[in-house]
Amino acid sequence: MVIAAMPDISFLIPAYNADDTLAECLASLRQQTRSNWQAVVVDDGSTDRTWEVLEGIARTDSRIRLAHQPNAGAAAARNHAARLATAPLLCMLDADDWLDPTFIENMLPVAADAFPPDIAHCAYRRVAPDGRLMRVEQPPVLAGDVAKREFSSFCALAIHTVVFPKSLFEHLGGMDETLQTGEDWDLWQRMAFAGAEFRRVDKCLAFYRMKAGSLSGDPVKMVRDAVRVTTKAQTLRMQQCLSAEEPETGWFTPALSQLRMLAWVVSAKLDPATDVAALASLLPEMPDAAGYEGFLVDVIMHGLQTGLFTDRPDDLIDALDKWRPTFLALIQLIERHSFPGTGRKIMENVSWRLTAANPLRSFTLGNIQVVSVELGALSRIAKAGKVDTLVMHALSGEQHVGTFVGPLWGDLSVRAQIRLIMQEIQAAEHLQTPQTLAYIGSWTREALRGYRAFGGLIIRNGRRRGRFERLLVHVGRKALLASAPSDKQDNDARLSDIRRDLQRDPVPRFSSSSGPQPEEGKAAPPIRSEEEYWEHIFERPDPWNYVSVYEQVKYAQTLSLIPEGIEKALELACAEGIFTEKLARKVGRLTATDISQRAIDRAVERCRDHSNVELHVLDFVRQDLPPEQDLVVCSEVLYYMKDEEMLAAVCGKMAAALKPDGYLITAHAHIRRDEPTRTGFDWGNPFGVGTIKQVLAARPGLVLEDTIETELYAIHRFRKGSVADPLLRVERHGTPLDADVAKHIIWGPAGVEREAAWTTEVTTSVPILMYHRIADEGPAALRRFRTPPEIFRKQMQFLRRQGYYTVTAQTLTDLLRSGKPIQGRPVMLTFDDAYLDFLTDAFPILAENDFSAEVFVVTDKVGGRSDWDSAYGEPAPLMSWSNIQQLHQKGICFGSHLASHTPASAIDNEALLAEAMLSRNALQSRLGASVESIALPYGATDFRVPGILALAGYGIGFTTQPAKATFSDNLFGLPRLEVRGDRPLESFPELTGLPGAFIG
């Protein structure tokens, strides 16, 4: 007989009618490498030989302590056992489970009755009724608050894999005896919220025996008790003020956790008679499962494999008839309470996992038909029931050569299969050529149709021989397709009928002409001299928009620096005389000059009422300046000097032209290249006002007397003489800025020049940013989708400062198809829904930062309101067709957001094709340009959608999946990074991969 010592660990074992498994369970304890254990076995009112078996084993081992109680349930039996336990650590072991011999050896060093308590847990394996060991089930890492989060949603640990302090168990009041199931889940949850630390032992040390017919227990009890446990978790979370329940924090709402248990129970039960609706009625609320499809698929697959005692997903195909009815009922339930298409996504995901495990198997699940075709033995395949989605695996000698996933319209005749193999799967080389008269006849007809191509090829060299061989392959494939059997109900025929019907009523075309267009093919003549360059600049009157508010404020500030009593003044680079006319009122006599005769001619006309003004052409770089001036004004021109040597020479000329105590006034902009750490213009000039000021200040006899400094430019007054204390005035520049001015400004500290990034950087990914509204006001519930204009301006200034340039959908398509690294820093800006505030608030900011954008239009709602948002408050106005046409002419690109803003996953094949074509035709007709891009409302897509969009004529599609676009992405599934209006401005740089960069 084994004599008991003071135990280090006590095992709490409830036993109810367990006479057939108790011996093996206790034997696993007696085989432990560490012998200092105690087993407290409580017979919970058994009616079989359980007590006799226990007494027989206990006679030979005093470490086994027995107790008996009337049947009260497992939780009560464990509490009873805990009261009798004498060890500081406990483990709960069911009578039909067992442990690895090294369980105690590995677990005891990790668990500790400390503060906070340390709880050890390990992996386990289920054991099928026939003795097969299932895969190892590894628990998650439960460090810190992760344990609270995980146990708030589900039972992350098997009951017999956990070792915990008895003191903690007693402190928490033991197990909740009112729970008939999930009592261990409830205990782990309370331990986590009590501050216990869960420490994982990375070994499989426990085994769970599975019994046919009892795996999921009573589903009503399981769902009912899950509601109680998850509701309690929410109370505990709120008491401790932990993170809100939302996807970003990882905390699930109680409703989603309860749906999780419902889905697992239904899947594991494998009973076609299960009343899914009755089980669902036990839930306080049914949640919207959109966004959690993949998570629910994991739960369902685990439940199905548990119920069928299998680790192989493709084994589920053999049992489809057993679980399909209940599964479909569950999917219908989820779909009724979720965003449209959620159920379809779950079904697609399950189907894909099944077929990915074994592409040789064909089956139908809901609206999805999976077929496996051997290319050497094609035969007609009937479309199953109401199926609308096809997954077709092509096999050549059991070698998988490709898969088609897309819409299904009709039966798969041999011809329809061959077309998919050739055009979609692109595995034509694996098709076998039939030796039939039909094929020979088709080959001859196809060859005769291409006789000119054959006749043009004379086989003389390798290149022509290769072209000849390719032509033979082309003819052979067309002949194979033409000779294959088909019928009027097959996939291709049905699709042709549908498309023909949709094209009978074309959308009327609207003229988008806005006047005469420039002649094509006529290049501008080459410019051979400085004079010709400036004459070319002044072909258009006022090329720099000197009448803008920005320039007029600068003129007023310049005039404020002109001293009283100036008799003789010289203006260099007077352009068309807009400032000249103002200056003439401040001086006695004024000589105004410019290098351009066109500019002087316009200045003469403008200043004809000023008799004190003399205007003539002068190249002040190469010609002498009129001497003895009281004032020289030279603004916005000195950065055109080719280098500092030329600048110094010109500055010397101006200084020499002044009388003693004469004045020189200059106004020039800050240029980023000249002053890279401050706001400035991105012009390509070699220097700006920073260098100009230094060169002038270095002239002997010239002294800086007065300065007006603004964020964008500085105006300096130099004096030919001495100055006591120079003045500095900081003033504001004029606003609003003209877009042609603003788009050249880089705001803020040092960044990256576009040109520098273009020449030194390449990338293989493109951030596609997704916006909705650019507005301050709107419903609180939609704040996420609304970016305030001033925040948007700072975001665009950040992109500009960091050297980004925008690409359109068409450019992005070309870049991704090329597969070549992309130069510089590309970004794509997209705006869903075409809100009116894009015109009023977004576009001006885009223009002032030299950016374009792609706007996705809900074509049936143009000129109306966003009625899809009406549940949250007043719908926002949308742009009209005239607004859209106006922006199109200014370089904004437009794509489709479908016609009705309905989720594509909620539309059947034919209706989706019709709506996609209608929307594209409407845009092309109104804009007079091809439309290739589409962003689906809500990002709702599924297996069918890309193929349907391609049939409708689109070339690129955008989703709401959060990632950068890369070469490996499907062109109809490009991800986008949502710019959320409820996030701080500082989070924006991270979207582009520049976390922590200044955004200001």
Image (tube, helix red, strand yellow):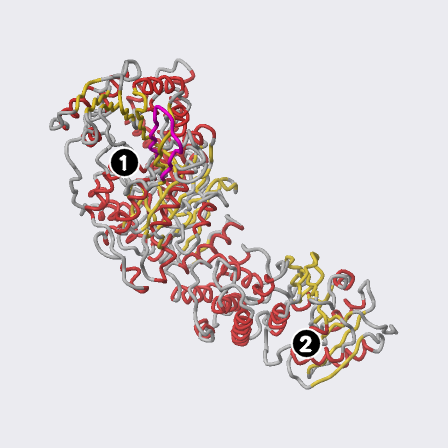
Q: The N terminus lies in which quarter of the figure?
A: bottom right
Q: Is residue 249 left or right of residue 127?
A: left
Q: Give the percent coordinates (x, y) of residue 721.
A: 36, 24
Question: Counting other residues with Cα less than 10 Å from the Cα at mark 2, is it few (<14), some (14-19), or many (20 or more)?
Answer: few
Q: Which residue is mark 1?
A: 560
- The one nearer the camera, 670 or 730, is 730
C-alpha gap between disc 2 and disc 1: 83 Å
The residue most toward the bottom is 70
Question: Counting other residues with Cα less than 10 Å from the Cα at mark 1, is it few (<14), some (14-19), or many (20 or more)?
Answer: few
Residue at image point 39% right, 46% down: 794
- The one nearer the camera, 526 or 318, is 526
Q: Give the percent coordinates (x, y) of residue 532.
A: 24, 17
Which residues lie in the magenta part?
713-729
Q: Is residue 728 magenta?
A: yes
Q: What's the amino acid at mark 2?
A: His
Note whether residue 123 is visible.
yes
Query: Predominant secondary structure in magenta?
Result: strand
The residue most toward the left is 609
Q: Which residue is mark 2?
A: 171
